[in-house]
Structures are given as C-alpha cells and as structure tokens.
Image (tube, grey):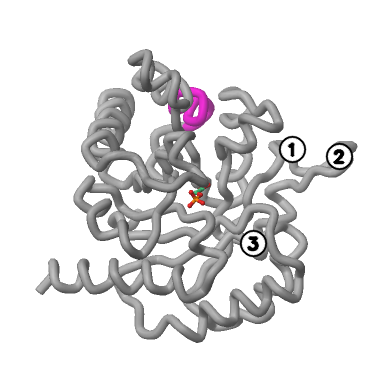
Amino acid sequence: MKERKKMVVGNWKMNTTISESIDLAVDIKNKIKEIEDIEVVICPPFVSLNSISLNLGGSFLRLGAQNCFWEPEGAYTGEISPKMLQDICHYVILGHSERRQYFGETNIQVGKKVKAALEFDLIPIICLGESKTQRARGQTKKIVLGQLRGALNFLDRGEVGKVVLAYEPIWAVGARNPDEPGEITKVTALIREEIKNNYGKNVVRYVRILYGGSVEPKNVAILTQTGVDGFLIGRASLDAQRFVKIIQVLEDLYVSARN
Ligand code: PGA
C-alpha cells in the first residue's frame, strides 16, 4: 500500500451534458501542469464517464463515479454496478449526504456499496457528516462514527486501509462558508482515533481523510491547517479556473512545506 498522497476530488453532481463535460475535463487537463504532490480526481455524471476517459488518455487526471449499486449485475432497473465502472474509474463517491437525504441511503446500504466497490478494484470515497441540528445537540460523534461503522462494516483490515473518507458537515455543502477549521480538526481526529482503535495504527496511517463543503480558492489554504489529506469539491469543480486555482494553492503549500 502507498503512503497518503494528497488528493483533490471534483464532484460535478448532476451537472454538464456529455459535450460540456468533455470540454470541462479537457480544460482542466490542459490547465494543470507538472503536478506531483496531489492526486486529482474528477467525478462527472455516469453518462459522460466513457467519453471523458477516451479524451483523457495518458493524462494524470483520474476518474471517479458519483455512486454505484452493490450487486454486480441483474434485474435492478436504472442502477449502475461497480463491475460496469471498473474499467473506466479508479474511484467512486459513496454515501454523499445528497444521496442519504434525497434517496434514503442508509449506513448499511453504504456499507454494502463500499464492499462491492472494493471487490471490483474501485476505491470508495465515503462521505460522512452530521446535520446542523445534530451538531447543535452535541450528536456529531455519534452520527459520524455511526456512519463510519456502517460504511466499514463488511471490510477486513486490508480493505479498510484502502478507503478514502470525506468529512462533509451537511450545512456546509453548497453553502457560503466552510465549517470552522477547529471543528474539522476535532471531527477528523475522532475518525482517525476510531479507525486506530478498531483496525490498528498500521491501517489508519493509510486512510486518507478529506474535507468537503464550500471549499474555494480563497479558503483552501486555511483549511489545510486542519490536517486533512485533501478536499472534495462541488461547485468550484465545475469551473476549470477555480478548480485549478485550488490545486495550485495546495501544490504551492505542499512544495514549500517539503523544501
Ligand atoms: P460544495 O459541495 O463544494 O458545492 O459545497 C461539496 C460536496 O458536495 O462534495
């Protein structure tokens, strides 16, 4: 297994037609030069994945899907399986708060999807996060660790070491401002502690934890002080200039920290 390489993931959600998505992917690819320290992943809608993968040949940009089902095939009208994605994607976002909220995804279902994704060599990017009311009631730990346990429920230690987690407090997604850096630091530390206690320190050191929720070029530098391994980005990833600016800010920070 590899060390924790920093990571920036763009979640395009239900945006862009096929031709718009190809243009955006190619624009991002052309704007990013010589990037060493950061793994960059874009997650376009399902219908665009194949065309984009053909247009990105030889590029360092990696592709991710935004969801998948847990069965490899069968009578599941409208679903997309990890088996269908394995040839075009490296990653798959699972358990995003919008899927939990609008499509009723449960912790157990997310766990089944996570297991299935890994069986087809897709790395799951698992989203965790509490609502504003839950935060106000002091339930952050209970909710986030409950989601974490559900997501990792069917995995062995080796598999746990491969997953990527994204802490996204629900009210910060699609909002004006990200969560407070101090809060992000606390919650990501809780997540690390839980994985260490359940799977050991040799597993937790491989698990990347991202932050997501209103990340923009102007706030990303301060958010790195939370100790996260990268960012999951919605709106700003739909604008090549903003997305690439975020990556450049991070690259500059990481390079100067290394030197
Ligand atoms: P946002 O979305 O960057 O638009 O807040 C983040 C996400 O949903 O992952």
Q: Callout 2: helix, strand or loop?
A: loop
Q: Residue at 66% across / 81% down in the picture?
A: 55
| In the rendered image, the vertical position of residue 3 relative to residue 149, given as above or below | below
Q: Are marks 2 and 1 in contact (CB under 8 Å)?
A: yes
Q: Nearer the viewer, mark 1 or mark 3?
A: 3
Residue located beneath label 3 in the image:
44
Q: Earlier in the sequence, mark 1 or mark 3?
A: 3
| Residue 2 or residue 124, whichever sits in front | 124
Q: Confirm whether the magenta stretch covers residue 47.
A: no
| Residue 58 or residue 228, whichever sits in front | 228
Q: Quadrant of residue 115?
A: top right
| Gap in angstroms between the C-alphas marked 1 and 3 | 22 Å
| In the rendered image, the vertical position of residue 182 relative to residue 228, given as above or below | above
Residue 25 in the image, given as x and y percentages of width and height: 59, 75
Residue located beneath label 2 in the image:
74
User: What residue type is disc 2 on?
Assistant: Gly
* Residue sticking out furthest to the front: 176
Q: Does 150 sit left or right of 55 as displayed?
A: left
Residue located beneath label 1 in the image:
71
Which quarter shows the C terminus? bottom left
Q: Confirm whether the magenta stretch covers residue 153.
A: yes
Q: Does 250 sit left or right of 17 as displayed?
A: left
| Residue 206 or residue 183, whichever sits in front | 183
User: What residue type is disc 3 on?
Assistant: Pro
| Gap in angstroms between the C-alphas marked 2 and 1 | 7 Å
Magenta residues span: 148-155
